[in-house]
Image (cartoon, helix red, strand yellow):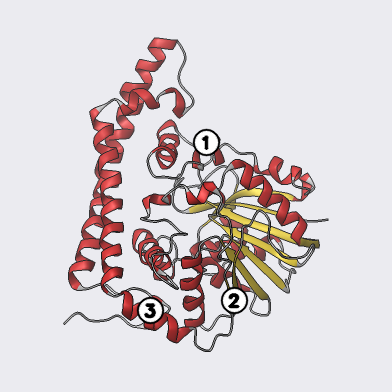
């Protein structure tokens, strides 16, 4: 009989469980991912550096500096096509395996969700009339079946359960283990490092998803009231149950971060974790303005994001970032990698000299260490994993 791992193993009580065969399938495709990264990535990098770039330089007389200048030639080569096929295949197969596992145990999970939310310490408020922005509703982000907002049943939580199991499986030990809360701890560490005396009473987490980072932020500021918003009702239902099972009082509500229903100056700290790379450029600028509106004078916004910055990347790493936009249903990642965050924050109302941007080494627990902050990319060259891009600003 398959051993059911306990609450302590996953950190909460509503994580979908895998049978022996389901776990074996997950592990198989994770091993395929590791094999691809270890064996095919270096070959693809050599293909670009030793064949594609010299050919481009010979044709134009100039060495290419942007992935856009070589993408067409690279994508025409069979080796790169092989790399693309593998990269998409193992990810899609993990999604499919976990989705089937959740369908098998959906009724059991529904009982757990109901049990955990029967006597809540937090709250959940949904808006069935909320208009979902196209930049969310039109894409299956990360090729996730149905993405974040699709309800498949009454009081549905499938998307949240799917996202929780996949993100924790796919990143495994690279973002805080099964809780997948490393981004939240990294954000809190940034706050404790640069604003050590700051003690917010009210915190708003934007684009909270299922609250993985929200719970970590709450643990860093245990006396604060925590509000968390997202567009996806099934994500919020699951996130509410997840937080309740951990005993963390979070007030979840379904809202658009571009225009919330909170009053002006009603928060001390406004945060987000890996939200903007799934937001259009127009949406990002509206959200930044909303952050400024929501903060009281002296309040702080703090965002952590996927780290690639094109000015700090090799051509192949630029291409790897572009892969997310062109093939992995993350259409805004490439444009975000070229965005001037300081300029966006300044235009949103923040004073330029109050805006701080740079990379923050990812941590699995609170660690306010200035040596973990740097401005030119990860010191070990880990541009896609190992660090997060941080932007914080104080409202004057």
> Which is nearer the N-term, disc 3 or disc 2?
3
Tell us which disc is closer to us: 2 or 1: 2
Distance CA(mark 1)–CA(mark 3): 43 Å
**Residue 300, position in %: x, y?**
73, 60
> Which is nearer the N-term, disc 2 or disc 1?
2
Q: Residues within 10 Å of mark 2 (few under 14, many from 20)?
A: many
Q: Can you see residue 210? A: no
Tell us which disc is closer to us: 3 or 2: 3
Residue visible at 57% across and 60% down?
207
Is 344 left or right of 116, judged from the image as shown?
Answer: right
Q: Quadrant of the C terminus?
A: bottom right
Q: Quadrant of the N terminus?
A: bottom left
Is 99 left or right of 295, judged from the image as shown?
Answer: left
Disc 2 secondary structure class: strand
Distance CA(mark 3)–CA(mark 2): 20 Å
Disc 3 secondary structure class: helix
Disc 1 secondary structure class: helix
Q: Residues within 10 Å of mark 1 (few under 14, many from 20)?
A: many
Q: Which residue is mark 3?
A: 110
Using the image as rendered, state which of residue 281 and residue 45 is in the foreground. 281
> Which is nearer the N-term, disc 1 or disc 3?
3
The reply to whether dot 3 and dot 2 touch (C-beta < 8 Å) is no
Q: Which residue is mark 2?
A: 250
* Rendered image quadrant of residue 206: bottom right
Q: Which residue is mark 1?
A: 310
295 is higher (above) or lower (below) than 50: below
Using the image as rendered, state which of residue 385 and residue 262 is in the foreground. 262
**Residue 267, position in %: x, y?**
74, 67
**Residue 51, position in %: x, y?**
31, 22
């Amino acid at each position: 009989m398959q051993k059911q791992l306990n609450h302590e193993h996953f950190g909460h009580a509503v994580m979908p469980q895998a049978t022996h065969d389901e776990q074996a399938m997950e592990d198989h495709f994770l091993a395929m991912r590791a094999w691809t990264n270890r064996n095919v990535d270096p070959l693809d990098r050599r293909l670009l550096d030793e064949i594609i770039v010299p050919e481009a330089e010979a044709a134009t007389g100039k060495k290419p500096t942007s992935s856009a200048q070589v993408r067409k030639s690279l994508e025409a080569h069979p080796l790169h096509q092989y790399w693309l096929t593998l990269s998409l295949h193992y990810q899609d197969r993990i999604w499919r395996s976990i989705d089937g596992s959740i369908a098998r145990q959906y009724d059991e999970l529904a009982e757990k969700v109901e049990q955990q939310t029967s006597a809540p310490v937090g709250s959940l408020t949904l808006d069935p009339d909320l208009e979902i922005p196209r930049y969310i509703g039109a894409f299956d982000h990360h090729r996730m079946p149905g993405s974040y907002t699709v309800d498949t049943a009454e009081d549905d939580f499938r998307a949240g359960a799917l996202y929780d199991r996949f993100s924790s499986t796919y990143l495994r030990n690279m973002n805080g283990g099964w809780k997948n809360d490393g981004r939240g701890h990294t954000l809190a560490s940034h706050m404790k490092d640069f604003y050590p005396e700051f003690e917010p009473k009210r915190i708003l987490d934007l684009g909270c998803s299922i609250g993985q980072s929200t719970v970590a932020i709450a643990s860093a500021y245990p006396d604060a009231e925590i509000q968390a918003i997202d567009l996806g009702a099934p994500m919020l239902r699951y996130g509410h149950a997840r937080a309740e099972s951990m005993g963390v009082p979070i007030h979840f509500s379904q809202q658009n971060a571009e225009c919330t229903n909170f009053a002006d100056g009603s928060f001390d700290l406004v945060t987000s974790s890996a939200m903007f790379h799934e937001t259009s450029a127009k949406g990002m600028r509206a959200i930044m303005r909303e952050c400024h509106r929501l903060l009281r004078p002296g309040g702080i916004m703090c965002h952590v994001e996927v780290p690639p910055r094109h000015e700090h990347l090799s051509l192949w790493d630029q291409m790897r970032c572009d892969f997310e936009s062109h093939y992995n249903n993350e259409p805004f990642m490439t444009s975000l990698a070229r965005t001037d965050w300081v300029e966006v924050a300044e235009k949103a109302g923040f004073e330029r000299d109050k805006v701080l941007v740079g990379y923050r080494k990812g941590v699995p627990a609170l660690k306010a260490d200035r040596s973990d902050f740097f401005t030119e990319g990860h010191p070990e060259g880990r541009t896609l994993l190992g660090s997060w891009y941080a932007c914080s600003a104080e409202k004057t």
